[in-house]
């Protein structure tokens, strides 16, 4: 077995939260499922997301310098699947969403919470780009259980 295969198998055993990162691309809402999201600092509030370089999500964040992280709740696995499998232009069809209060970014209705950020730094690492974001707003939308991803399956905590 090659190291890449072993590494992938090891990482499947590490449970992660599930988010949809949103922005705009050419005036249309854009989003993708991301589990490589992290809090970097509390003072000042700073977050980071790793996005595949050259992807639609990458182009959206790169063109606007803005992104929102939507933290999904336990019964929103269908949203995670839609934003990872469906063609980018179809992900928002028949989906309830609204514009965030500060930056006007697409926010998925009924998600657990969201964070709005302005890109302050970009770091290219292998086939991904880390977009470091200064948090400009955050809001809790409900108190449901979060959605997690473990062993290639979406689960409730």
Image (spheres, rainbow, N blue to C red):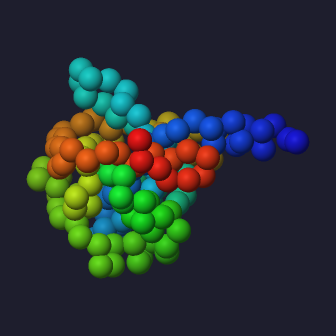
Outermost residue on the top side: it is 43
8 lies above or below 98: above
Going 31% across and 68% down the picture, which residue do you hit?
Answer: 29
Quadrant of the frame with the C terminus: top left
Going 32% across and 23% down the picture, which residue do you hit?
Answer: 41
**Residue 99 percent across, percent down from the top left:** 17, 61
Whether residue 49 is visible, yes or no, is no
Q: Is residue 93 left or right of residue 32?
A: left
**Residue 156 percent across, percent down from the top left:** 42, 47
Quadrant of the frame with the N terminus: top right
Going 78% across and 39% down the picture, which residue do you hit?
Answer: 6
- In this view, the residue in front, 3 or 60, is 3
22 lies above or below 122: below
Q: What count of labels does the image hold? A: 0
Whether residue 89 is visible, yes or no, is yes
- In this view, the residue in front, 42 or 78, is 78
**Residue 53 percent across, percent down from the top left:** 55, 52
**Residue 26 percent across, percent down from the top left:** 33, 70
Going 41% across and 78% down the picture, which residue do you hit?
Answer: 90
Outermost residue on the right side: it is 1
- In this view, the residue in front, 108 or 116, is 108
Q: Quadrant of residue 145?
A: top left
22 lies above or below 4: below
Q: Is residue 59 left or right of residue 4?
A: left
Q: Is residue 42 left or right of residue 35?
A: left
């Amino acid at each position: 077995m090659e190291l890449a295969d072993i590494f992938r198998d090891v990482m499947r055993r590490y449970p992660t939260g599930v988010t949809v990162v949103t922005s705009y691309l050419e005036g249309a809402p854009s989003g993708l499922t991301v589990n490589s999201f992290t809090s970097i600092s509390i003072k000042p509030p700073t977050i980071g997301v790793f996005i595949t370089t050259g992807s639609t999500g990458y182009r959206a964040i790169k063109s606007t310098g803005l992104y929102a992280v939507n933290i999904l709740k336990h019964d929103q696995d269908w949203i995670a699947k839609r934003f990872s499998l469906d063609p980018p232009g179809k992900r928002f069809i028949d989906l309830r969403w609204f514009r965030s209060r500060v930056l006007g970014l697409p926010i998925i209705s009924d998600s657990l919470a969201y964070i709005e950020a302005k890109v302050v730094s970009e770091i290219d690492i292998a086939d991904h780009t880390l977009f470091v974001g200064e948090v400009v707003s955050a809001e809790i939308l409900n108190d449901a259980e979060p959605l997690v991803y473990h062993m290639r399956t979406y689960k409730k905590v």
